[in-house]
Image: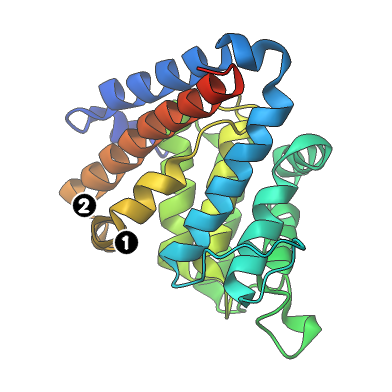
Amino acid sequence: MTNDPLAPLLDLPGVADAANRARDALSAVHRHPANLRGWDKTATEASWRAGRSSAAIDGGSVELRRDGDFDDPILAGAMRVSQALDGESLENLMRVVRRAPAQALARLHTLAAADLVDDAEELGRPRTETDIASRLDLLGQLITGATSVPAPVLTAVVHGELLALVPFPTANGVVARGMARLVSAATGLDPHCLGVPEVTWFKRVVDYRRLADAFAAGTPDGLREWLLFCCEALEAGAAEAKSIADAARGK
């Protein structure tokens, strides 16, 4: 693709190789025997782990009640997002994000922030600063075909850019991770959302925050470190998915 705005990222040392490793790991876990027919069950377990880890990154609780409700509003929002990225609702959101990323983003924020705002009109509405609108528009163009970089790189850029922009008054972390998960599905990188990179981001939350700030600074080193970190998390998330699939087979 000519004039691909993300193409220079592939020239950063190690990025192309890291993206390939992440792609291959996720592809392999989709071929796991438990996922050839029973991926719906393993995907549901992955969504629960993803939601709890995403909430914990932002200081939310990880305690799940027996009745399925959540006392903590951050956890409740994160679980709504993760459950929306599972099964039939994931298929619906993939169709939306491929043609209208802004609508998908608004939907994820509505789910994530429903218990965090007093005014429902704030749900799904990005802040109105001009630079936010223009950068969200560019991000939407990237998602809908303005780049041909490997999916792990695009997913990391979407994730990092949303963290850097802070487009909403609340729940930006949960939304950024949810959007990254959705883009990884819509691009075919992880079509059933079996991977759980959120576990790595939570385990290494200090690195996660530091490298997100480095990405936001926009230096070559900062961009590279964030991209490598995200690819590493995707690869580790595939290993998490394999453990889920192994357990499903009784190993």
Q: Position of residue 120 (x, y in %)?
A: 79, 82
Q: Residue at x 49, y 39 (%)?
A: 196
Q: Secondary structure at mark 1?
A: helix
Relative placement, left or right, of 76 versus 6 is right
Q: Residues within 10 Å of mark 2 (few under 14, many from 20)?
A: some
Q: Secondary structure at mark 2?
A: helix
Q: Position of residue 235 (x, y in %)?
A: 37, 29
Q: Position of residue 129 (x, y in %)?
A: 55, 79
Q: Residue at x 59, y 67 (%)?
A: 75
Q: Residue at x 53, y 29 (%)?
A: 244
Relative placement, left or right, of 233 versus 185 is left
For the residues labelled 2 and 1, say whether their Cβ atoms are less than 8 Å apart. Answer: yes
Closest to the observer: 53 or 163? 53
Kindly identify which residue carries mark 1. 216
Type of amino acid at the residue the image marks with label 2: Gly
Type of amino acid at the residue the image marks with label 1: Ala
